[in-house]
Every structure is written in C-alpha cells, then in structure tokens.
Amino acid sequence: MAKYLLIDTSVWLTLAEDPTLTKVLGDLATILDQNLAQLLVPAITLDEFERNRSAIAGRAEKQFQSAASKARSVVQLLSAEDREVLESLLKRAEKRVSADSELAASKLQTVKRLLTAPAVVKLVPPDHTRLRALDRALSKKAPFHKEKNSAADALILESFRDFVTSSIKPQDEAAFVTMNKRDFSDPKDERLPHPDFSDLFLSPDRRYAINLAEVLAGIQPAKNWSEEIAAYARAAARDTVCLFGGEHDFRDGAYLRSAYGGLTWQEWCSKCQTLRDTGDPWD
C-alpha cells in the first residue's frame, strides 16, 4: 500500500521560514528519504516556491533592520546607561536573527531537494484540469469564494483530483495538506474540506489535513509526535489569533506591493487591522 502526500505551497514556505518547525521538516525529510511516503508535486507548487524563495531568505534580517532603526531613533532620549542596555539587546537580537536566517537558508535547500527528488510524482495539469479550475472561478466555488484570484490554489486542488481519481490504486492512501484554511477549509469547521470539493475526501483513504505533523504521525505511528503536533498547531495559530479576541476576520483586501515581489493579494482584519499577505500574485 502506497502513501501519497500533496503538501500545499503555504506549508512548504512556513516549514522553511518558521524556526519552530525545523524538527517537523526534518521528520518529513526522513519519512520521504526512507520511502515511507511519496510526494505529489504540482508544477505550480514548485513555481510558487521558487518565486517566494529569495523573499523568505532575507525577510527576517530586513524586518530586524527596520525594527532596530526605529529603536535607535529614540536613543537620544535615553540615559547613557540605558543606551548601552539598548545596544546590548539589539546586538543579541541581531545574532539570533542571523542564526535564524542561516537556518532558513538551510531549510530552503532541504525543501528544494524534497520537491525535486527523483521519487516525486510531478503533476503537470493538462488542458482539462485547467478548464476545471476555470470553471471553479466562473462558478465562484472554493477556492474562488473569497473574491480574489485563487488560480494557483485551484490548479493544486484539481491536480490532486486528477491523481486520486485516475492514477491511484484502490488500497493506496493520499493526503492533501494545507495551511490555507481560508480558501480550502469548511468555514464551520476548519479541520474539514470546503463543501465545494468535499466529495474528494469521502473515502477513508483520502485525507484532508491542516496539521502536517498529524499526517506524519499516521505514517510512522511508533514515534511520539506530540511535540511536533503541538508546535505545528502553534505555528498555524500565529496567523489566526486576533488581538481583539478570537480569530482574525479577514473580510476586505486589495492587491498591494509585497515583500514577495510585485503585487499580491493582501487582506486586513476588520477587528484589529492586521495585514496579511497571502502571496497570491496579480496575474
């Protein structure tokens, strides 16, 4: 019995950038290297990863430099003793950011290796798959139900549909793993797929998942995964917890200049005004 994993671009980027998920990425690499599971890699996933790779590599240092510049702008208001304390703290923080940036660069290399390994199943969407994605857009079906360009998400979803309906054996298992709960999850229960495509997951051998570590635990059940599952859940929650209580209410958005480069769709919370860059480009 084969086990297949389609891991959404949002997950790969977070695995590479978030230092708290280093162990999860290492465990995933071990499972794949031992042929305990096989990756399904849509062509668009590799394209999105390459487009965002350079932004991730330098983002932490850019954010720190911006914050440090603001901190130093008030140095004249401090006593000599306090200025020394501030500089000491900034130097310590700079070392930490530098270490995290080096770790991110190493993890980006790991992700690239996994996505391009000879054993991966490359999913190149034929014309009929692209037409199904277009039909979703015209019908305003998920992931196009939020009034934004979700062409890449739709191609990933429809590539998964192609594979599980035509290229997989009855006894094989396949999981679709994402962090993009806004576009893919059921609004009433984020653990479930959106009703617009829930038919893909009616079989117990077809799994929709928002926690990669939980999926890996099912592949390698002898290992204790509690630490990784909790770390992954915390990483996912960092994007959803609102300062005014509950989850963010990302109701409005626009295409704005992005740290990823070019224009991307960005949404802001109607409660706390937090701005979230989805990374979806202007086409």
Image (spheres, helix red, strand yellow):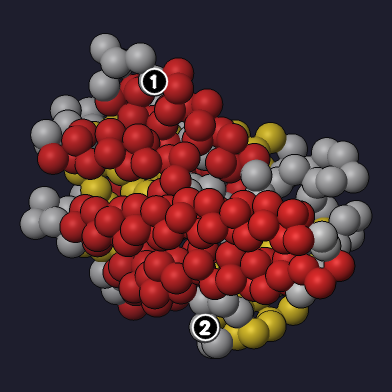
Q: Is residue 234 above or below residue 200?
A: above
Category of crowding for the residue at label 2, using alpha-carbon neighbours closer than 10 angstroms: few (below 14), some (14–19), many (at least 20): few
Pick the quarter of the image with the C terminus. Answer: bottom right
Q: Residue at x 13, y 56 (%)?
A: 117
Horizontal and vertical percent position of residue 116: 18, 61
Check disc 2 and report the residue beneath it: 261
Horizontal and vertical percent position of residue 188: 74, 38
Distance from the alpha carbon under mark 2 to that under mark 1: 36 Å
Q: Residue at x 17, y 32 (%)?
A: 36
Residue 225: give its label: 1
Q: Residue furthest front?
A: 80
Horizontal and vertical percent position of residue 170: 24, 33
Q: Is residue 218 left or right of residue 2?
A: right
Q: Residue at x 50, y 67 (%)?
A: 61
Q: Is residue 127 left or right of residue 79?
A: left
Confirm whether residue 19 shows in the render. Answer: yes
Q: Is residue 203 left or right of residue 238?
A: left
- Of 121 and 168, which appears nearest the observer? 121
- Give SS at disc 2: loop
